[in-house]
Amino acid sequence: MHLLFINISMKKFIYLLFLFLGFAEGFSQKDSTNKVLDLEDIVISANKFELKKKETPNQIELISAKQIAFQNSPNTANLLEQTGNVFVQKSQAGGGSPVLRGFEASRVLMVMDGVRMNNAIYRAGHLQNVLRIDQSMLERAEVVFGPSSVIYGSDALGGVVHFRTKNPEFDVKNVRSYLRYSTAIGEKTGHVDFNIGKKRLAFLTSFTFSDFGDVVQGTNRLDAYPDFGKRPFYVERQGNADVSITNNHVNKQVGSAYSQYDFLQKISFQQTENIKHTLNFQFSNSSDVPRYDRLTEIRNGLPRFAEWYYGPEKRLMVAYHLELKNTLIYDRASISLAFQDIEESRVSRNFNNVNRKSQLEKVNLFSLNADFQKVIKEQTLTYGLEVVGNDVRSKAHFTNISTNEERKADTRYPDGKNTMNTWAIYVADQLKVANTLILHGGLRYAFTDLSAEFIEKSFFPFPFSQIQQKNSSLTGNLGLVYTPFAKTKLGLMGSSGFRSPNIDDLAKVFDSVAGSLIVPNPNIKPEYSYNGEVSVNQQIGKKIKIEGVYYVTNMRNAIVIDAFTLNGERTVMYNGQNSKVLAAQNKAKAFIHGWNLNLKADLSKEFLLSSALNFTKGSINDAANTPLDHIPPVFGRSAIKFQKKAFQVEVFSIYNGWKKLEDYSPSGEDNLIYATKDGMPSWWTLNLRSEYQMNKNFSLQFACENILNKNYRNFASGISSPGRNFMITVRGGI
């Protein structure tokens, strides 16, 4: 039935919303235990300090620690997808790129414990950095939809995904652990964490290790596409030659296995009632992560690549956090000083070519955030500053795998000194005009200084040796929350967002698809978005909660990949192939609109129904209304949950609509080459998960995902999702 919603207009959205309200009203006549929380009971931190959800006009998805444990996702990308409100693209099993309101990658801001994760080489295509976060240690995750540049700055065009790890507990000593095994993804995960807390000093230590095998996809295919997603071959090196091996298990996606470990150490010291210090150390590292989609490509009847993988992806964060309270100029203050060391690499080798290409990128990221809040009668003032410094180093070489001889190769980014620095100040105000009306407003000024240096130009004789940019921007928002009744909330919001071009936008050399090459363009400028949204939140009785939002976004100076010239030439030879020259350019005005519906209903004391549905449509403002990239089809999730005493079980369905051929962007970012000849088919899965709490210290979890063993693939993805997957988890603690 979800296919019926693909072309729904604003009128139909309003009709559906009232239909939902009528449906909910019918349920509200029945007796039930209150399990659906009042809107004002939910506390979130969209403005970096706690705020009742009923008081903010933003659409926000809150994932609690209890939800995270019950959902039992193998990685953080899957955790976000399980909400039904976040779309996730995957190029490989070790990947997962969140999409918010049609924005992805560098247009979605990720924050960890108040520290910006986005750096100068976050690309506009698809990112897998969210997997370098250990969901086992999350206290909660918050997804703020829509431009959030006033509070969070550049990149928050589609929204913000803010991850918050657990904090050390004072006067508590405990140990928690779990073991998990999954069949279709060959997962073996082990986790342990322990807390040692004294009166004023507390330590929290955590370690998680995961090993994933090759993903086995479902066998139940659509009749129209009987071979879609099959893996008929894989490559092995035998002697001095690459050999294409016939895969006798075509549903086993050979070349998708990887492993990862995560370590966390936090130390908290409560100096006084009003002063608290926290030291936060996080380290994540992976094995080589095969780029599965590239390993399936064919050229001239043979595999295009013998090797293509990301080298170990390392993320180190060391942060000091200071919390202060109760002075003349603020009631609360939050100050963070952080250092991040990021390392990623790409290794590729063409089939039967002895030269292996290795590209290595290292990013050092320094940041200072200072946020303050002051309450003056009916007014809450939030203000602060942010300073971020990026230093990027890029290296590359070829290795002859027969002789081990090394020679220089073209780097992904300029091989000289590359820096990107940002300074910003902001102020946001919340004013309670009346008991039923709250006004919100804010402004942010940001200045960005970027420099990139090309030293080696023998591979590509660029007509410049250095790129320098200085950009500034002023963004704002204005909104209101109207609560005419205790359980009714109406929201109206207008906001602007911006994204300053980074090193990846300005200076990257990359073959996004076979036969195309992206080259640097030093002339691109910041892109801006202007957003308007209206929302309705209605609680009916003690059992029903309905949420609906409709939004429109206008993009100006949108950065898109389009045809370009290099030294007057429209094509160049790259990687043994004549390739069309492309570059990032401010060519587009774009328009995005969409809606979201959420329903939660207590059917009885034990049964809870929930459902989420999302629709997004985007196009470039040209004569042809060219489809915008990164726009997912209609998608959602519906579930019914039973809970009684120590046992809970949930049956749920996740679904996606069709993405037809004519709706794909011509830029190549939507990865049409990994879809069918007609586009990406619609799909839905049936799933079950359960948990039994044996006693206060031990629990057992069991799940069966994709029960019908369907073969499906998310839009823009280059790997098929797992088939029928049995999962068992044992949790224990003392």
Image (cartoon, helix red, strand yellow):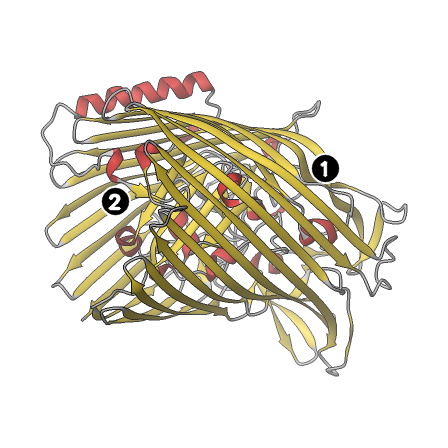
Give, as a three-letter code, the residue at label 1: Asn
Determine crowd level at label 1: few under 14, some 14-19, many 20+ residues with C-alpha closer than 10 A: some
Helix, strand or loop at disc 2?
Answer: strand
Give, as a three-letter code, the residue at label 2: Val
Asked if 267 appears above or below 107 in the picture, the reply is below
Helix, strand or loop at disc 1?
Answer: strand
Q: How far apart in space, not on screen, are marks 2 and 1 (Cα)?
A: 46 Å
The residue that label 2 is drawn on is 651
In percent of width and height, residue 457 lies at 85, 62
Determine crowd level at label 2: few under 14, some 14-19, many 20+ residues with C-alpha closer than 10 A: some
Q: Is residue 50 visible?
A: yes
Can you tell which of label 2 and label 1 is closer to the viewer? 1
Q: Nearer the viewer, residue 354 or 491?
A: 491
Q: Nearer the viewer, residue 351 or 286?
A: 286
In percent of width and height, residue 284 lies at 47, 68
The residue that label 1 is drawn on is 586
